[in-house]
Image (tube, rainbow, N blue to C red):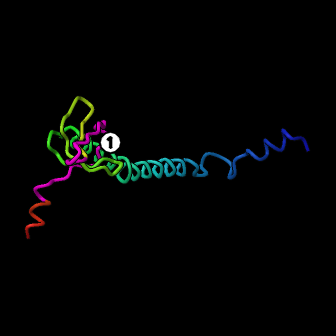
Amino acid sequence: MDVSAFILAMGAPQGGGKEGGGGGSTTLMFGMIAVMIAIMYFLIFRPQRQREAKRKAMLGQVKKADHVVTIGGVHGVVTAVKGDDVVVKVDEANNIKMTFTKSAIARIIDKSADEDSTER
């Protein structure tokens, strides 16, 4: 058997003509793809954008005297904010200061909430 004849025979549509109902399955396929994209948007992309917006807002609010924790786990007090960098005092006794970029800050610790919880 000739290879080209075999390929043509394999590609022939089943069921004959246009009335076989092939259009409905294409619409269903595109509908399922649209549903999957919507699910991915609401479960993955949208929450990620919200977390990133909260993080940007938190980094924009960093100011002097804030108690912070870096992504490396270093605890300290912000002594200066210089553009995209922050100077953090990590040791009171020896006056050791380290400079980090703002993006290295994992969170700002609310000392007033911590003091309220220890007083009880």
Disc 1 residue type (three-letter): Ala
Residue sitting at x 41%, y 51%: 40
Q: Quadrant of the N terminus?
A: top right
SS at mark 1 in the image = helix
From the viewer's side, name the closer residue of 57 and 43. Answer: 57
Q: To which residue does mark 1 refer?
A: 104
Could you classify mark 1 by the number of other residues whose Cα lies within 10 Å: few (under 14), some (14-19), or many (20 or more)? some
Farthest residue to the right: give it: 1
Residue 71, position in %: x, y?
34, 48
Membership of 95 in magenta stretch: yes
The magenta region covers 91-113
Q: Position of residue 18 (x, y in %)?
A: 61, 45
In the displayed structure, would residue 50 be above or below residue 99? Answer: below
| View extreme (front): residue | 94
Is 92 part of what is drawn in magenta?
yes
Q: Which percent across, then down, holds residue 84?
A: 27, 31
Question: Image point 9% across, 63% down: which residue?
Answer: 116
**Image vertical order of residue 79 relative to residue 43, above or below:** above
Question: Taking 45 as reference, is 17 left or right?
Answer: right
* The C terminus: image quadrant: bottom left
